[in-house]
Amino acid sequence: MLIFQDLFIDKLEADNIADLCRLDANGLIPGDGETFMEYKLRLMDIRDDLEHFEYELSTKDEVEVFEGLKVSAKDRIQSEIVNEAADLTWRLYQFKIDWVPGFFLSQDIGPLWGGCAISDSNKSLSLFLIRNSFSKRRKWFIYNRLELLAHELCHAARGAMRQMHLEEFYAYQTAPSRLRRYLGNCFISKYDAIFFLVPVLVLLAAQTVQTVSEWLFPIWPFWLLAVSYPIFLFLRNRRARSKFFKAFRKLNAFGVNDAPAVLFRCTWTETLEIGRIRSPQTLNEYITSKAEKELRWTIIKARFVDKQYTEEFKLNGETGE
């Protein structure tokens, strides 16, 4: 967490591309349209919240991180476990986070709960909570500790982007299962699960009524309702994947080797625009124009197009050093 020490953030300047690239490599990616000053203020808020949290953790037996949920220093996830997940996100998207606190949670959350990231709307800092079972094993039930942590690290890195279309797609690329990598982006909002389950429950209720009563009515409309939303989710996911891979192929064909890392930092609209680009010259003009207007693209261009500082990060190993 060296980026939050020694007044690194306070000394940050808009023209210091090396430091901005270092922050990006640490998973502190500027948001869509975020100016340099807005970005710097957000980093200061994260640093202040982190310092306050670490102070509370060192002076109290337990810290309440959410209503009814408490963590303690002894339950902190070891750095070597977090680093395994960070190594995976580096291979996929060229970022490595070591500044988000993570804890094994021993409280009873439920028999099927594996872990999650939580945040307070009044604070900039997020935390990871995973089941205490993972403190001694890599796998539990259907969950994989490495995938679970890497998944949440992806959400933490893209938090300021506030984009839904490919959010779960990027996070689920950390999964070892091809099926989860393919279907993970089907559920991208809290309403998707509701609209998926309610028609099924309505179908069940209709069949129950027919079974226990003499009221006869066509059952096929309920079946149609039950399957319509899963079909919609599948088709929406298929379209999103198609748009990503179209943009991915264009970047690869036009000489951008770190296409997944670039697209990870793009909005949905930018992904569509890249997919429509027809030549390397047009792509270069597009990136140059974006970099002149937006901080996020200034960093993308420096790291993944101009290839500045890339070898330095690889040699250092730890992106925060």
Image (cartoon, rainbow, N blue to C red):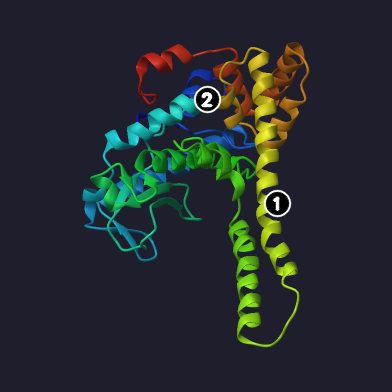
* Circle 1: residue type: Phe
Q: Residue 13 carries which label?
A: 2
The mark found on residue 232 in the picture is 1
Q: What residue type is labelled 2?
A: Glu
Quadrant in the rendering for residue 170: top right
Is residue 160 in view from this perspective?
A: no
Specify which label sits upstream in the sequence, 1 or 2: 2
Is residue 237 among the parts visible in the rendering?
yes
- For disc 1, the neighbor class at 10 Å (few under 14, some 14 to 19, many from 20) is few
Q: Where's the N terminus, which quadrant?
A: top left
**Circle 1 or circle 2, nearest the eye:** 1
| Depicted 223 relative to depicted 99: above or below | below
Which residue does the image show at 57% across and 34% down from the upper left? 30
> Residue 260 at x, y = what percent?
57, 26
Q: Is residue 281 left or right of residue 245?
A: right
- Asked whether, in this view, residue 117 is left or right of residue 57, the answer is right
